[in-house]
Amino acid sequence: MYWFLVDETNKNPVRDHFFIVGGLVFTPEQASAIDAELRRIRSVAGYKTMDSLKFDTNSRPDHVSVEDATRAKDQVIDALREHGVRMIVYVILHDVIWNSPYDTSMNYALNVVAGAYHDLLTRENATGVMLIDRDNERYDHLEGLFQAGLVYPTGNTRAVDDRIKLFGMTNDNASHLSSAADVALGAFRYCINTAVGSGREDVARKILPKLTDVIWAVETSAGKIMKYYGFHKYPLEIRSTKFRERYQELADALNSYAGIGSGAADNPSETPPTRPAVR
């Protein structure tokens, strides 16, 4: 039974450029290993039992120094990489969804990452649980994902309950796995925001090569591919020239930070998936 812990970030359309939803997929062995790693990392850094370990340095307790908190976050990402934990992320420009209610945007993002998680489970002949960070407005949507699956504009549906056996909620202080997901997604957010001028490039260049190893990728004839697997950049078709340029600037910056070519995140030979609608 796998575990997929999901959260959202960059949800302020005024301050943030890209809305991000994503999380980490743990096998049972990885869940136990990361739990043990987080306990060790927290202890060494000086986090107490009731303290939160999150990516945002400002959220650290007063008795943990900035240096120790930064080192702890780096060690969390190193642990995820070492133990082979996979990450699935969804990114969309706020300007594309400016006229959509937040609920619509969030539900659509959950559809995409749920579909990707189902693909991963299918490839590995596994079943799993999907837990999102606590959001009282999402109960009906999670119920719909389990009962009706993904609903497409054509009216066709794709059941996901054959693999995803439970949809539910959690929060960052309910497990060390949630803390690891917060750190990973926060690190990814930092790199995205740096690409649009809201962060330090030297930090992003340190973070993203490690995250690139964590984002779920599949080996294909074209090489190691993240697009449509662990990395989901939406919309699939960008008609606005201005928006295409902004996405290209983002891709160029991320590839530069990661030290990779464009192929890993963008494989034009792959057929885009059918897009699920929002119920």
Image (tube, helix red, strand yellow):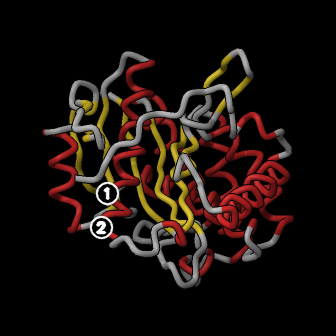
Q: Position of residue 230 (x, y in %)?
A: 55, 39
- The one of 171 and 268 positioned closer to us in this rendering: 268
* Residue drawn at 66 percent across, 20 percent down: 219
Q: Label 2 neighbourhood size at 10 Å, few (<14), some (14-19), many (20+)?
A: few
Give the residue type at disc 1: Asn
**Left or right of 96 in this view: 171:** left
The residue carrying mark 2 is 103
Tags 1 and 2 touching, CB below 8 Å = yes
Give the residue type at disc 2: Asp
**Left or right of 123 in this view: 195:** right
How many marks are shown on the rendered structure?
Answer: 2
* Residue drawn at 38 percent across, 21 percent down: 122
Against 59, residue 20 (above or below) is above
Q: Position of residue 152 (x, y in %)?
A: 29, 40
Q: Quadrant of residue 218?
A: top right
The residue carrying mark 1 is 107
Report, in whole angstroms, how far the alpha carbon at label 1 lies from the one at label 2. Answer: 6 Å
Q: Quadrant of residue 139?
A: bottom left
The dot on residue 14 is none
